[in-house]
Image (spheres, rainbow, N blue to C red):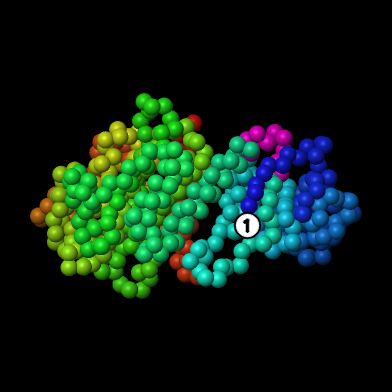
Amino acid sequence: MDFSIKTFDAKSTVNATKTGCVVVGVFENKKLSSSAAALDKKGEIAAALKSGDITGKIGSSLLLRNVADIAAERVLLLGLGEEASAVSEKAYTQAVQAAARALSGLGANDAILALPAVKERDAAWTVRTTVLAFRESIFRADGLKSKKDATATGVKKVAIGVTPAVATAAKNALAQSIALANGMDLTKELGNLPPNVCTPTYLATTAKKIAADYKMGIEILDRKQLQALKMNSFLSVTNGSDEPPKFIVLKHMGGKAKDAPTVLVGKGITFDSGGISLKPGAGMDEMKYDMGGAASVIGTMRAIGEMKLKLNVIAVVPTCENMPSGSATRPGDIVTSMSGQTIEILNTDAEGRLILCDALTYVERFKPAAVVDVATLTGACVTSLGHHNTGLFTRHDDAHDKLAAELLSAGKQTGDTAWRMPIEEAYNEQLKSNFADMANIGGPAGGSITAACFLERFTKKYTWAHLDIAGTAWKSGPAKGSTGRPVPLLTAFLINRAG
Ligand code: BES
Ligand code: MN
Ligand code: ZN
């Protein structure tokens, strides 16, 4: 799908524009948006509203052909809700989603959107929201079906109409939005692939390809090298699996050589059976998504690589399977992490923190400006925040409040939102072990917080935040599939940091 920015001005009006379909807004009180009014020389659009063929409610749509005195072949009316001088974020988002659906079934090859500005949102927001809605509508996860899903027919070219005042901003935002959509598609693809295809080795190969495509540095550490680094906590998770573990380091050094890098760490469990603390069978297939942190970090690297972002960013992905076998880690086993801290593994299903803690120690060598880890870490996070917000955890001091604010605002900016949770001494008590420095579980109460407290113990040397994406990385049920989150949040966070 091709996107472009179309500038409307006195010379280039919406009426005179040749296109398969021009898309305009109408309101619930039967009023027309300014571009709809401009097209309505003979009153056909007003008549359609009056007849009740379209309500103007958010998400409603109606296609008109042969509208008099205009150059476009068709007019697609979109409901934008109650009339306002600038429409709401929600109205715009749902309207472009409806437009993407409607346009996918049309004979038209191209379309032009001529929609009103969005309240308190800039052109960059509008362009990103539009591109992501259209790209989501044509995304298919049918690579392994022998008969492909019906592909979206209809429009191949979408022009986003803007006023001259914001044309430059819109054009800059367009390239970034397409790069973001490409990164999200990669994240979704990796997430949806079955665990017998998307193995640690497959993730490593994908990272190598990104490195080659965007001239990034890459290092893949294997079991021997991980042993030499004393990553015994990470390695303990691999004991039951026949798949070799990988430790991926992908470097995008787009900033000045002396600038401290921003480091992203992604949990890459390509299948989480629970290990000896085996999970129940129902829905266990969804634990192929337990590499969602890794997939989002790799997708974000693809996005910023395509953008040539002027920032130093290093992605680190510890990746392996969590399987039961005669050689698997037992509940009660004690391991010494790379940091030297010992861990009593009371539940082999709390494996994410075991692979992340060694990665968090490893990244100390980069003297990072900040470290953000991303993980499908706890079912408890889904219980507390549901599927709307990613859980955000940091220490509570000025530097960390600032990092939290950056991440929260990147989430709000993109609609890929996070919600901050506490990290406090009181929760830390739950991690006490009689036999080691800590246990890997803290009991059922506040499970997402005790998991974050566990990670926090390995991040004392830098500014750090943890994103628990257990509720946001994928959807269950009939719409089962990866969401591509939190690539929009991470990408906006990095773009903002690049300044
Ligand atoms: N990958 C899971 C977390 C998860 C579960 C994410 C369900 C999304 C949906 C993680 O490795 C895990 O199993 N966590 C345990 C921790 C518990 C044993 C302390 C959990 O959440 O049950
Ligand atoms: Mn687990
Ligand atoms: Zn897991």
Q: Position of residue 309 (x, y in %)?
A: 48, 35
The residue under the point 76% across, 61% down is 63
Residue 169 lies in quadrant: top right
Residue nearest the observer in this picture, 323 or 345: 323
Apparent side of residue 84 relative to residue 197 in the rendered image (left or right): right
- Residue 300 is at least partly visible in this image: no
Reply above or below: 13 against 391: above
Residue nearest the observer in this picture, 497 or 20: 20
Name the residue furthest bottom.
282
Q: Where is residue 150 in the image (x, y as percent from the top left)?
A: 61, 67
The amino acid type found where label 1 is placed reads Gln
> What number of labels is visible?
1
Q: Position of residue 276 (x, y in %)?
A: 21, 67
The residue under the point 44% across, 32% down is 254
User: Quick one: label 1, few (<14), some, or many (20+) residues within 10 Å?
Assistant: many
By secondary structure, the bulk of the magenta-drawn segment is best described as helix
The magenta segment: 161-170
Residue nearest the observer in this picture, 175 or 451: 175
Residue nearest the observer in this picture, 80 or 106: 106
Which residue is identified by label 1? 97
Q: Where is residue 259 in the image (x, y as percent from the top left)?
A: 38, 28
Report if residue 165 lies within the magenta region.
yes
Apparent side of residue 70 relative to residue 298 in the rendered image (left or right): right
The residue under the point 50% across, 51% down is 184
Apparent side of residue 11 relative to residue 353 in the rendered image (left or right): right
The residue under the point 64% across, 38% down is 171
Apparent side of residue 308 relative to residue 268 in the rendered image (left or right): right
Residue 118 lies in quadrant: top right
- Mark 1 lies on a secondary structure that is helix
- Residue 197 is at least partly visible in this image: yes
Report if residue 72 lies within the magenta region.
no
Name the residue furthest left.
435
